[in-house]
Image (spheres, rainbow, N blue to C red):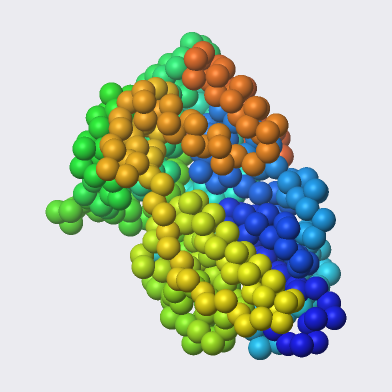
Amino acid sequence: MSDTSLARRHRVVVIGSGFGGLFATKALKRTDVDVTLIDRTTHHLFQPLLYQVATGILSEGEIAPATRLVLEDQQNASVLIGGVETIDVADRTVTSTHRGRTTVTEYDSLVVSAGARQSYFGNDHFAEHAPGMKTIDDALELRGRILGAFESAEVSTDPAERARLLTFVVVGAGPTGVEMAGEIAQLAHRTLAGAYRTIDPRDARIILLDAAPTVLPPFDEKLRRAAADTLENLGVEIQLGAMVTDVDDDGLTVRDQDGIERRIEAACKIWSAGVAASPLGRQLAEQTGAATDRAGRVLVEPDLTLPGHSNVFVVGDMMNRDGLPGVAQVAIQGGRYAAQLIAAEVRAHRKGRDKPERVPFRYTDKGSMAMISRFHAVAKVGRLQLTGLLAWLLWLLIHLVYIVGFKSRLATAMSWTWSFLGRTRGHLAVTEQQVVARTAINRLDAWEDSRAVPEAATASAR
């Protein structure tokens, strides 16, 4: 911090309104700084609950409050909507664009928490047929695909095509994949049972597959086994040691451990098998000499900064520090930690004191958990391992605590009450603007037409 900065307030730019970015911004509320939070979306997304939007339990508004409203009482914070194009660490500027307008924002301290996107391990063309689940748009698209498959099956007259439409494949058996497979099973077996006339949704085939040898790899054996048993009791087929080699509109090709490839015909495919850090990580690494891992995450210093740039912090899914997992708690604690260092140094500078010594970041593991279905979850908190109802209640409580805003917490609690204690789900609407919701029906129409053409040609030949 230069002496000239005494004439103005310290400028902090935060990139990303996810857990890391939002909690860093809020932690600076009582600090004599000006904070600019930049993000391409207008909301803070509670990403761990996206699968419940995709399966109709929650609405997008319940897990994605407007960032401006979240920060409306924080007078030293402003929100700038735009996608960050470049970060110049030498000139200390961030360039963002929104609707054709470019904005250059100067900073004294920078917190980069731009998150991660879905990774298809070099097969990006898979995304067209097997969407991931990282944004609200992703969740709404998946809702359209899931419900569209049931609607298409209702009007199909061919048993093979109906079976394809009622086959749902979730790729990736980590927490997101496990939770998604469990909820699709609940949707088919409880919520939609009896709602159709020509099909029984309980005939739906839900497949959870992964190249790994087990579900929930980060968890202990006891919890992995409990999760697998619960999924199988729900009717989910677990296929492990299975690597996806191709995905198309009709299904996917899988190679088993013995090297033999096989085909799974499925209309709805969901990808939750991997993540890749924001491209901004590579940009920062090239400018600072920092290394990146295979997922594009930046290897940061002990204080979460970049080599030679103690004013640039990288937190959340973009950073790699001691192999910490890409979970919300790492982002939250990293964002708060960066904010605390900035605040302490600003106070010291204002008082003419030397910078305080930085204590390296230390992550406090508050536990891992995954909900399998209503009344069933697995959780590890310290040495304590929980399964079943108690773990499920703990899962509900922890997620409610970290949802931003009282209104969102109340709305979420009410939606959970209706969904888990009853059979209904209040958010199963699909609009005409969701093109993917019509894709399955259009696919069925094309298939019906293709069957009609040969029959007509045969009749003409006669």
| Residue at x-position 36% and y-position 68% | 322
Residue drawn where x is 48% and y is 30% of the image? 396
Residue depicted at x 27% and y 52%:
211
Residue 274 in sight here: no
* Image height of 349 relative to 132, above or below: below
Report whether 379 appears left or right of 145: left
The part of the image, by quadrant, that contains residue 401 is top right
Expressed as whole percent of the image width and height from the top left, the position of residue 441 reads 57, 33
Q: 337 above or below 374?
A: below
For residue 21, which quarter of the picture?
bottom right
Q: Tell me the quarter of the image containing the N terminus.
A: bottom right
Q: Position of residue 57 (x, y in %)?
A: 56, 28
- The residue closer to the viewer here, 175 or 391, is 391
Residue lying furthest left:
258
Q: Measured from the top left, where is residue 121 in percent x and y?
A: 40, 63
Q: Is residue 323 left or right of residue 419?
A: left
Query: Vertical placement of 393 versus 9: above or below?
Result: above
Answer with left or right where residue 371 lies relative to residue 312.
Answer: left
Give residue 336's quadrant in the image: bottom right
In the foreground, 192 or 372: 372
Q: Is residue 289 visible?
A: yes
Foreground of the two, 75 or 429: 75
In front of the other: 229 or 32? 32
Q: Is residue 157 left or right of residue 36?
A: left
